[in-house]
Image (cartoon, helix red, strand yellow):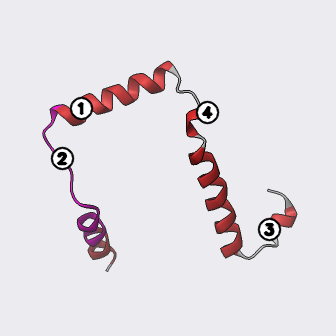
Amino acid sequence: MRDDLRTLPIGERIQLVEDIWDSIAAEQAVLPLTAAQRDELDRRLDAYESDNIRGREASEVVATLKKRLL
């Protein structure tokens, strides 16, 4: 890490990382998947579609996690 970045307050460093990540996410189509990545995504999608478990609402997951932390 560049030393001048270490002098930024942590909040500014976090914001910088978020901004960088957002810029990468906005251009994700530019990053091609490898064959292995595509195969893994297909495998996970097949598993999701075949197990009939549709997951939980995000709010339910957050509530469960909060209970574990208390």
| Type of the residue with mark 1 | Ala
Q: In percent of the image, x 79 and y 56: which residue is there?
A: 1
Mark 1: secondary structure = helix
Provide residue 13's location: percent of width, then percent of height: 70, 68
Q: Is residue 41 above or below residue 9?
A: above
Q: Residue at the location (67% across, 54% down)?
A: 20
**Is disc 3 in contact with disc 2, using a CB cutoff of under 8 Å?**
no
Camera-near label (4 vs 3) is 4
Q: Secondary structure at mark 3?
A: helix
For the residue marked with disc 2, what is the amino acid? Answer: Arg
For the point 62% across and 46% down, the residue is 24
Q: Is disc 3 surrounded by few (<14), some (14 to 19) or many (20+) residues within 10 Å? A: few
Q: Which residues are magenta?
A: 50-64
Secondary structure beneath dot 2 equals loop
Given this view, does label 1 or label 3 mark the residue nearer the observer?
1
> In the drawing, what numbered circle is on residue 47?
1
Q: Nearer the viewer, mark 2 or mark 1?
A: 2
Distance of mark 1 from mark 3, alpha carbons? 43 Å
Cα distance between the residues tagged 4 and 3: 30 Å
Helix, strand or loop under label 4: helix
Residue 30 counted in the magenta span: no
**Which residue is label 3 attached to?**
6
Label 3 vs 2, first from the N-terminus: 3
Q: Label 3 to label 2, Cα distance in Å?
A: 43 Å
On the image, the x and y values in percent for residue 56 come to: 21, 57
Tell me the residue that label 4 is attached to.
Answer: 30
| Residue receiving disc 2 | 54
Is there a contact, CB below 8 Å, between mark 4 and mark 2? no
Q: Which quadrant of the figure has residue 8?
A: bottom right
Q: Is label 1 in contact with label 3 (beta carbons under 8 Å)?
A: no
| Label 2 Cα crowd, 10 Å radius (few <14 / some 14-19 / many 20+) | few
